[in-house]
């Protein structure tokens, strides 16, 4: 066997939790969660969301950490290591491969030749690589997501510069809307921002896990918390801010709908950065002394806390200044700068700078984790050094990012790509950026999320996976649920333990829930 360099490791639980939380806390927490909460019943929606986190978020995240720590490898290597000698892997993999090939044939019969070719490739991949294909899919989505995530990350950097140089002060709402259009559709701004974002992430990843990712997270995450506190204080001290708090938190059970539940489920999956191998890769740098269950809980709590805090930083101020809440890029890039300009204390530029710097931090810690997945995989599969792998990945991601940046608003800059994609895939997305987003969110992520659960629950086997969870976490895994909740020791045999609940969830409940999400995404409901 080739000599493998000793792997870098986290220095302790804190570094690991902060890095994983940095990955989970991203633009979704700031521009999506508060808004969907406000629209779907406030506090009532938060309860549903917490339910989704329990049923989908925590179990899948634990699967990923366990896979990573057990094998000490990136997603592709992790699946390979655990499936190489299993007869179940071969049989189910082959079965899956034929099923996908059959789908490809059906697609070709219906005239969707482009989709048929893609599915054919996926089928051959499944026949040849079996369950390792799930690892390949997750690394592929990490690389493509990073492409468009870094464009948005780049905008946050552009806006931080604009805010700090006070270029948005005294502008009207129309001027600020026009500014966003200019930046989003100008290749120069988008590409410059995107490269700053990618190069910063690359510089961190270049220095490795402990010296790069962990150190950066330990500085940036506390900074993010402090900035959020400042913004919340400012928002809540404006007269009339209670209406915003009400919008965000007042429970209204009549607003809970089927769509709301699916939105909560989808967001739980997205916000924890599941299905793209990040937690597998981060888990692979974890030593056996750490408690995976405890770390997962800490990451999930931090992520939810920050999402709620972001809501408290945004909505009270918006309502106090009588502005309409919205979500997505429109909220942060078009509405918020106007709100800051209307601040009564004339310090709008300062609040604006804090807000965009906070967004940039949230985005960059997520970008780092995405890049780490691709870099770690390149190092292992191509047997090259981390430094070489980083350079290679920056070139790759930079290319995807440029395509996204050139077409973030419309296809105008890349008409040839649009007509080609339309001819082959019959796509009707508004831009290349949207296309990658839809493809990842609706297809790749649910597929790999489901694959990870089924693999851990059925192929590797929950019995073996639990043995890994026990390292450093015996007090959680084999403890009865009532014992844990009550804090009273009572080692009776036959009681339901946390490990049993986890095993049952990942074998039955979680894959079904993710499958529903997939069906909903492709428009079946
Ligand atoms: N979890 C991030 C968020 O909440 C989104 C993200 C997805 C980040 C995928 C990285 C990778 O915004």
Image: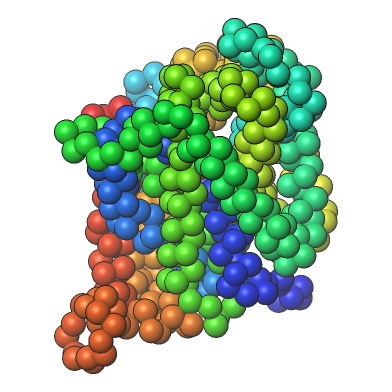
Where residue 314 appears, x then y in whole percent?
Answer: 49, 34
Q: Nearer the viewer, residue 296 or 520?
A: 296
Q: Which quarter shows the C terminus?
A: top left
Does residue 316 appear in this view? yes
Q: Which quarter shows the N terminus?
A: bottom right
Say if 126 sits above or below 322 in the image.
Answer: below
Scheme of colours in the image:
rainbow
Q: Is residue 405 left or right of residue 108?
A: right
Q: Nearer the viewer, residue 119 or 210?
A: 210
How many labels were placed on the picture? 0
Residue 32 figure quarter: top left
Say if 205 sits above or below 472 in the image.
Answer: above
Q: Nearer the viewer, residue 25 or 3?
A: 25
Say if 16 sits above or below 110 in the image.
Answer: below
Say if 275 sits above or below 415 in the image.
Answer: below
Residue visible at 29% across and 43% down in the picture = 43
Where residue 197 appears, x then y in whole percent?
Answer: 73, 38
Q: Is residue 520 left or right of residue 28?
A: left
Where residue 179 appears, x then y in whole percent?
Answer: 67, 13
Residue visible at 42% across and 71% down in the picture = 293
Residue visible at 62% across and 75% down in the picture = 12
Q: Is residue 212 left or right of residue 420?
A: right
Residue visible at 64% across and 41% down in the picture = 358
Q: Nearer the viewer, residue 136 or 243?
A: 243
Does residue 93 appear in this view? no
Where residue 76 appears, x then y in whole percent?
Answer: 57, 58
């Amino acid at each position: 066997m080739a000599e493998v360099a000793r792997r870098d490791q986290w220095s302790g639980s804190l570094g690991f939790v902060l890095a994983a939380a940095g990955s989970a806390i991203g633009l979704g927490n700031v521009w999506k969660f508060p808004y969907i909460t406000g629209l779907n019943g406030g506090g009532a929606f938060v309860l549903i969301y917490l339910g989704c986190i329990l049923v989908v978020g925590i179990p899948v995240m634990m699967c990923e950490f366990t896979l990573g720590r057990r094998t000490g490898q990136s997603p592709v290597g992790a699946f390979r290591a655990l499936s190489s000698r299993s007869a179940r892997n071969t049989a189910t993999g082959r079965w899956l491969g034929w099923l996908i090939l059959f789908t490809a044939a059906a697609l070709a019969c219906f005239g969707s030749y482009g989709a048929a070719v893609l599915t054919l490739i996926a089928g051959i991949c499944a026949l040849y690589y079996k369950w390792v294909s799930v690892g390949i899919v997750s690394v592929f989505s990490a690389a493509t997501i990073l492409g468009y995530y870094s464009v948005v990350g780049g905008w946050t950097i552009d806006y931080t510069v604009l805010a700090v140089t006070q270029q948005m002060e005294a502008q009207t709402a129309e001027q600020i809307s026009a500014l966003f259009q200019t930046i989003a559709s100008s290749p120069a701004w988008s590409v410059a921002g995107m490269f700053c974002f990618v190069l910063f992430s690359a510089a961190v990843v270049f220095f490795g896990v402990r010296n790069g990712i962990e150190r950066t997270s330990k500085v940036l995450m506390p900074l993010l918390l402090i900035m959020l506190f400042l913004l919340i204080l400012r928002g809540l001290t404006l007269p009339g801010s209670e209406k915003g708090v009400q919008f965000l938190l007042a429970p209204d059970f009549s607003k809970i709908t089927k769509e709301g539940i699916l939105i909560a489920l989808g967001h739980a999956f997205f916000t924890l950065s599941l299905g793209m191998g990040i937690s597998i890769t981060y888990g692979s740098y974890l030593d056996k002394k750490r408690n995976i269950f405890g770390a997962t809980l800490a990451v999930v709590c931090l992520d939810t806390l920050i999402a709620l805090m972001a809501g408290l930083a945004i909505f009270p101020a918006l309502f106090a200044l009588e502005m309409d809440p919205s979500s997505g890029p429109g909220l942060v890039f078009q509405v918020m700068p106007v709100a800051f300009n209307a601040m009564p204390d004339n310090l709008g530029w300062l609040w604006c700078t804090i807000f965009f710097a906070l967004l940039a931090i949230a985005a960059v810690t997520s970008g780092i984790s995405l890049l780490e997945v691709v870099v770690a995989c390149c190092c292992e599969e191509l047997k090259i050094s981390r430094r070489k792998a980083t350079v290679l990945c920056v070139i790759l991601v930079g290319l995807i990012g440029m395509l996204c940046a050139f077409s973030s608003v419309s296809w105008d800059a890349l008409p040839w790509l649009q007509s080609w994609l339309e001819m082959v895939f019959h796509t009707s997305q508004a831009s290349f950026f949207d296309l990658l987003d839809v493809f990842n969110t609706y297809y790749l992520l649910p597929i790999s999320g489901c694959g990870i659960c089924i693999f851990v629950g059925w192929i590797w086997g929950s019995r073996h996976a639990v043995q890994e969870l026990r390292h450093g976490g015996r007090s959680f895994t084999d403890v009865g649920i009532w014992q844990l909740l009550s804090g009273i020791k009572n080692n009776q045999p036959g009681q339901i333990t946390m490990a049993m609940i986890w095993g049952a969830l990942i074998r039955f409940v979680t894959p079904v829930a993710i499958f529903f999400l997939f069906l909903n995404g492709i428009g079946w409901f």
